[in-house]
Every structure is written in C-alpha cells, then in structure tokens.
Image: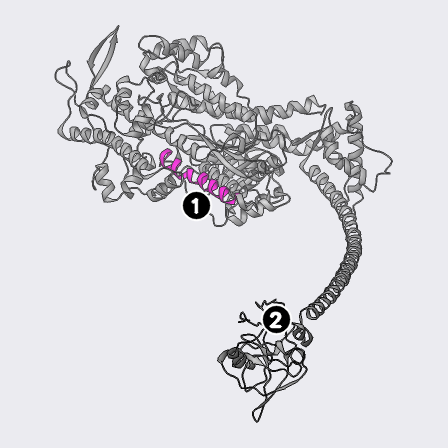
Amino acid sequence: MTHKASHHVLNTSRLRVFVSFTQVKRLVQKVHSPHPSLNTSLEGEIQAFLTDEDLLHTYDDLTKVNPVTPTTVLKCLQARYSVKVFYTHAGCTLVALNPFQPIPDLYSLDVMKEYHGAPQPQEFKPHIFIVAEEAYRNVQGQVQPVNQSLVVSGESGAGKTWTSRCLMKYYATVAASSSVVKSQDIVERIEKRVLDSNPIMEAFGNACTLRNNNSSRFGKYIQLQLDRCQLLVGASVQTYLLEKTRVACQPASERNFHIFYQMMKGATDEQRKEWKMPRGQRFVWLPNYEKTVDEDCFRETLEAMVHLGINVERQRQIFRILAGILQLGNVNFFSSTDESQPCNLDEQSKDFLQRASELLCVPAEELQACLRVRTLKAGKQSVFKPCSQAECSVRRDCLAKVIYGHLSCNKTVLPTKHSNGKPSYLFVYNKQLFEWLVTFINKSICADKSMWSNFIGVLDVYGFECFRVNNLEQLCINYANEKLQQHFVAHYLRAQQEEYVSEGLQWSFVKYQDNQSCLDLIEGSPVSVFSLLNEESRLNRASDAKTLRIRLEKELCDNANISWDKFSKEPHFTVAHYAGKVNYQIQGMVEKNKDPVPPELINLLQRSDNLLLHQIFTDKDADNPATKGLSKVTVVSKFKNSLESLMKILHTTTPHYTRCIKPNPDCKPLTFKKEEVIMQLEACGIVETIHISAAGFPIRIPFKSFLQRYGLIAKYSNFNSGSHCLDVEAPSSDVLRQEVEKLLSVVLQHKASDPSHKLDSEKHKSWVHCGRTKVFLTQWMLDLLEDQRKKILSQCAFSIQCCWLRYQRRRRRARQHSAALIQAAVRSWLVRRKVHRWNRAATLIQNNWRKWRALLKSLAEAELDDAKDLEEEDVPPLNPVIRERGSVQLSTIQEPVTVRGWPMGLALASAPSITVSLTATGFQKMMSVMASLNLPSRRGEYKVETNQYTQELASIRAQPKGSVKLHCQRSPLLYADRQPDMKSDVTGFNEILLEKTL
C-alpha cells in the first residue's frame, strides 16, 4: 500500500464523518449559546443530519452516530436511556448514565462470569465489566505498561461510588476464581477484607447531600494487588478530598457523615449510656436526623470492623471519640462583659463540655481553657489572651476537625470540599481518626511487596464544582479536575493526533479544548494563583483581600483565563475552566491557605487517657508545623504535591476512562434532562473524543511486535507460496514495513476470497495504514487479524495434537511390548530359581535322611545288649532276698538275672519269645513288667514279647553291673504311651527311667 493511496483512502473515509462540518459547527455554537432550547430549534435543524433516528438506541458506540455533534450524541444517549440501556461506548471512553434505581441482574455474578469468560467481551453490550475485563486481560497479557488505572469521573450523584464498588466486586470475584486449593482460603479472606473496607470508608467518609444520599465526601485511589498468576493477594487505599468541614458545618438540608447517624439509630441502651447519648437527645451537628437512608446500617459497619481486625476495645475507643465530637457541637459560648475575661458558658453548655471531656478522656478544666484562651509566645514567655465568642466557636470546630479529619505530614492527600463561604480550619497536619482508619485498613488488606507484581488502580474523585460562593476548597477541587482532564487530553486527544502526523498519516486535526493555559494560570511558574497565595500566606501580617486582588490583577493580567468584575463589591476573580467559568471569593482564602492549628489543642489531645487518641497525637509535636509558629508549608503546596504524586502513578499506568453522567439534578429514576446532560458532555470532551475515535485508528502496533504476533498468518496461509520467510529481526524500518505490507496483503486477499464477504478492495485499505514505525488499525481490522491468527493457531494445535497422539500411541505400544518381554524373562527366571531350590532341598533332605537312618542303625547295633553279652559277663553272687524279689529266669541263661527299676524287656532283648512263670512281687517290679511287656493273660501264664522287635522301642544301654546309664535319642516311634492301660495293647515307652542297681 503506497502513501498516496493510503492518504486518499483516509480523506475519502473521513468525508462520511465530517459531513458538512461548517453546518455542524454552527449547530454546536447554538448549543453553547445562552439559549439552550434543545426541544425546539435544535431538533429541527439537526433532524436533517440524523439517519435512522428510530434505531439510535441500537448504537452501542457513539462513533457510529452520523454526524457527530453534541445534539446527535445527546439524542442517542436519550434513546438508549429510554429503553433502560445505561452504558454506551464513546471511543476509548465508556459513558455511564445513572438510572437512580436498582436494576435487577445487571451486576449479578452470572453477568460477571459471562463477560469474564467471553473470548471477545467487546462483542457484548457495553458494560462497566468490559472496561474491567480489558484492564484485567492487559495484566494477563503483560501489555506494556502492565499496571492499569480505571479513572471514574463525574459530578456528585452521577454514580461514581457505585461504579467503583462494582469494579472492586468484579475483580474480587474474577481474580479469586482460582483452582489452587491451598490458596483458596487466603484468596477468599483477602477478597472479603477488600470488600469490607467499603462500608467503613463510606460510613466515615460519605454523607447525604441535596444531590446524592450517599455522596462521597472524599476521593480514593484503590490499588488491587495481583500476583504473577493474576490472583488478588491484597489492596491498598489512598484517600483524597475529605470534607472535614462537614463535621462542624453542614449545608442547609444536608446531613453529617453517616457514622454519626448510624450510632444514634443503631446503638443499644448500654452503648447509649456509655456514650452519654440518651434517647431523645438532640445534637446541633446532626441536622435532618429524622431522614433515613439505606446507608444508616450500624450493624454492617460493626461486622466490617470485626472482619478487618478492629477488636471490641478499639471499637469502643473509636465510638467514644465520635460521641465526644457530637457533645462538643452543643457547647455554646457567650461574650463576657469584661473583655479581659474569657467567654462564659451556660449550665447546659458546661454539662455538654463535661461529657465531651469524659468521652475524650481529657481534664474538663484544661479543655475549657484551651477553647476560651489562646497562648501567645513573646520570646521565652507565654502570654494568655482571652478569645472572642467567634474565636471560641472556631477553636471548638477546629478541635472537632483536628480529631476527625486527616492531612498527615507524611501522607499525600487532597483538599476538602465545602459549599458555603464560611471561614473555617479546613486542613490539619496530624494523623487523625479518619487517616488512622485508612492506615489500619491498609495494614489489614495490603500484601507484602514480594507477594504481588502488578496492580489495577480504581480512581474515584470529585467532579467539577461551581457554587454561589466558591473559595479555596472549590479552587483546589477544580484544579484537580483540570489536572485529570489534562491527563486525558495529553494521553488521548493530543498525543494520538500528533502520532498520526509523525507517522506520516494525512490527518486533519480535530480541534479540542486544551486546558494547559488554565493550569499555567493556577500552578504555573514563576507567577500563578497558587504562588501568589503562598507569598501572602508566608507574610507575617493580616491578610487583605483587596491587596491580594490587586496583586493578582497586576501579575496575571496577560492570561486570558482569568478576569475580574470591577463593579463587584466583594473582591473576587473569575477562572475560565474547561467546564465553565467560576467566580472565587478572595476573602478568607489566605487564612485557609495558612490553616493554623492552635498548639494548645494538640498538646491537650496528646495527654488524653483514651489510648487511641493518645496514640494518634503522641510524638507529633516535632512534625507539627502549627507548633513551630508560622508554617512555611501551605495547604495549596501540600495539595499540589499530593496531586503530582497521583499524576505520576497515572502516567506510569494504562488508563481506562469511565464518564459517569447524571441525567437529572433531582435524582429521579429514569428521568432524562437534556440541558443537564449536554453540559456534562461538553465539560468532559466526549464529542471531541468521538470525533478522533471515529476518524482515526485506535490501535497502534510497532512493526516488530506486529510481525512477531501475526507473522504466522503469512507463513501458514494458503495464499503464501511458502518460499518466503518473514524477517522479523531486520534492522531497517523500511524492510520491516515491506514485510508488514506483504502480511497485510495476504490477510486482505484471504478476506476478499471469502464468498460471504464480497467487499470493495479499496474499502479494505481504509481499515489499516502503515506508518513509519507502526501499523495503525481499526478495531474491525484487529478483529480480522485475531480471527485469522486464531484459526491458524487452531490448525497448528490440531496438527500438534495429532502428532502427539500418534507418538503417544506408538510409545504406548512399544512400552507394552517391552513390558511383555520383561515379564516373560522374569517369570522364566523365577521358575528356574524355584526348581533349582527344590532340587537342592530334595538332595539335602535325601542325604540327611540317609545319614540319619545309618546313624540310628549304627547306634542300635552298638548299644543293644543281647544274650551273649549278658552270658559272658561275670555275674556276682546274688543276695537271696534280691534273687527272690527282683530276678527273672531266662531260658538261655541258667542263672536268674536281677532287675530292679528298669524294664525287664530290655534285659530279655536277645530272646525273640520267652515263656516264663512269674510271681510279681513289689510295686516297682510289677510296674516294670507291665510297662515293658505285652502280657496277654493265659490262665496264669504270660507270653513275654519284647518291644524291641514288635513295638520298635528305642535302644538303650543297660549294664546290669554297677550304675545304669541312659542315652536319650529321638525315638522313631510315632506313638508312645506313658501310662499303659491293661485294656489296650501296650506300645512301650518313649522315655525310660532306670534306677541304680543294687
């Protein structure tokens, strides 16, 4: 694609968007005119440019509106709002209209899962979850810069708090959906704590106003900390813009902070007694007590405190401090007749002061003295001067705001907001109750730096403010909005168009409102509104509003963004902000910028017996500028530094913009006021954003990154010959450009060949443009590239799966064959080993058996006493008594053989059968005969059969002469009976006891 052709395409495609621009410009001027009759003349003139007005509600993106004018955009938003569609894309920005009523199932868990699980969430209907998911996927894809910021802006009542709450709930749900079981409990605990921080922050920082029942009176930047797996592991909260003046001064028909009403309506009788708040008690600082809102839920606040780790004792200390603040509001002072004496207190005020001192745990006398007498330093001496009635009231209010508010010396915060011009101490320099809560919440939910790698920030700040009386508060708030608007302009409106020109695109600049001159007026160097205010604040003299006005007019007269009304009685100056002109009252501005805090009050609180109050204010004397006399650090200086810190964070992240629009000033459900909406559209630059998004290329990718991601399309495409390989590492940008153009030609050729998409080839060229170093794409072209890349990756994945499955199958078969061979070898080895062991065991048994038989045989032969042995032995002469009682006559031996105590059968072993006539005398002889012989009765005769031959009795050695020794051997008898019974056959003994022979 040549430069000339691409330029022609850009100019041709832009004709559709900028149709009759001069007429549109004339209509825009009418919209800006002081006669906003949008229902009559504008509709008649714009009607000619509207196409398909009945289908305007179907336009999900305002870039589709033709032509793009404030009124056509307004008509589209109104049409979508009427059919209850509240989100609409506006290029890079999401426009959110507040319905002012609950919408069922719009933010349910199923909707979250649907957007999170969608391959292309942009194809779904516009929703805040699309912005959240886009940021989350940028972190997952490590798209530089990885850290993300979601900027939610809009005026009070536009729905910023609800939108931020939905974003936090979405991330707490999506980032906690982990399959890791061991960390699931930790993730759920962190998720619960992050969500529980909202009720506490809203109770202490939100209030009911005329424009919103739950208006945030502070801004916050919440960093949701994600680990390497994009799981929620912690969070941190930075607070801005706390409106502490609301503690002691509530605008008409508005209320104080929610926490005070929660205490009054939700406390038990025991708690009321402890807080010295009986039923029916009225407090000056609690107006509109009878009004009830959904946020008056004391139990929810207490449960959130418990979940975050605030124990019961610490809660008791907090609520006693809050009750003491309410008691201070009922203390009234009366001027004394003697100017040298302090102001007087009536009895009722003394009672309230006593209650306040008991609740704050400070001495009542010292508290009264600090409120009525101020201390002046004269060298090393202290001079006490009574305060006037007005000064006493200011010091009382200052004490309440010192305790409740926060602007720490070591923490960046933004200023407060106040709608009337009453002089008050707006800022304090110590770490007070609200900041202590924020610090405690951060300690409870913040993860260690080593645990998280990226974060997604949610920024919820004030919108532009313009009241009847505007002072330093409004100047700081509008300055903050100018900085955020300038960040949007620099990041998108200006930087994007300048990049088109630098990359060689033929681009006609879309005019937009650049607010840099307004920022130079407020914060510029060397002379600006802030610098002159600081100079006046550092002078040791009383401030003069007229003198400051003269200096402003003299030093800043060359800046077109500031003007003066010379006929006004009150000194003031007018600043032309991006959202409109605002008149600022000079009276009291210098005193607010000084923001002195009486040192007596700080010293008193440092000596409090309330542990929390003592902890908050102790050891702050050295860091407290108010205790050092006149401070050189002013409110606007601290505010500017804090805002610069915030902008540094935003510049290092990828921003995502959400513009919340308030459809009507009365917060009525489903009511659309055109005048109210168009003012907000003009202020935030929505129309200019749509112009640039519709005519330009929202996606810009460097050549090298483009080839690395989409080079595979040319490599695997059917239209590629396959002989050319993309050179991603080419050093020259011209070579890379040629490679990119070849790749794009392949993609467009493939699209043109699709029979379902018969499009003009010239129209294809309007979707993409090659610059000098980057490729500029429309969203449609990006979707086309991603679709083809997805198809090729699916084909490659399918081929890889096939090869892998084939490899796995082959590998499985080879392993099965190898396993079978191994099993067969093991089985054969086991069988061989078992047979071998059997053979060895059988041989061993046989050998042992043979040895045993031979041994028994040899023993039997050696130890048997036969008849010949007995015959050869010399038989000593026998005693007649012994012969008579213990002898046996053998047939082969002439002389009787004497036996006593040992079996006769052993002595007769040599005789196979003996017939003997025997008269058994003596118990032992009878037992021996009966135990050793089978004596079947045959009429007094006994046939003696030896056990040696018939019962296989064990062999013994029996020596008739001298001692008898018994050799015990294991008997081969299977049966042996120690107690013979005459009724059964005698089988012999296995053990034979022999006594010594006589």
| Location of residue 335 in the rendering, given as x and y in whole percent from the top left corner | 16, 20
Q: Earlier in the sequence, mark 2 or mark 1?
A: 1
Residue count near mark 2 (Cα–Cα under 10 Å), binned few <14, some 14–19, many ≥20: some
Mark 2 secondary-structure assignment: loop
Mark 1 secondary-structure assignment: loop
User: In which quadrant of the rendered view does residue 58 lie?
Assistant: top right
Horizontal side of 987 relative to 280 (left or right) equals: right
Instruction: Please determine whether, in this image, residue 474 is positioned above or below residue 860.
Output: above
**Residue under the point 38% across and 27% down:** 417
| Location of residue 976 in the rendering, given as x and y in whole percent from the top left corner | 59, 76
Farthest residue to the top: give it: 379
Instruction: Please determine whether, in this image, residue 603 is positioned above or below residue 762.
Output: above
Alpha carbon distance from label 2 to label 1: 124 Å
- Check disc 2 and give the amino acid type: Ala
User: In which quadrant of the rendered view does residue 423 lie?
Assistant: top left
**Which residue is labeled 1 in the image?**
101
Instruction: Please determine whether, in this image, residue 92 is positioned above or below residue 487.
Output: below
Q: Is residue 378 visible?
A: yes
| Location of residue 329 in the rendering, given as x and y in whole percent from the top left corner | 24, 30
Residue count near mark 1 (Cα–Cα under 10 Å), binned few <14, some 14–19, many ≥20: few
Q: Magenta includes 201? A: yes
Horizontal side of 965 relative to 868 (left or right) equals: left
- Check disc 1 and give the amino acid type: Gln
**Which residue is labeled 2 in the image?**
958
Q: Which residues are magenta?
A: 183-208
| Location of residue 199 in the rendering, given as x and y in whole percent from the top left corner | 39, 39
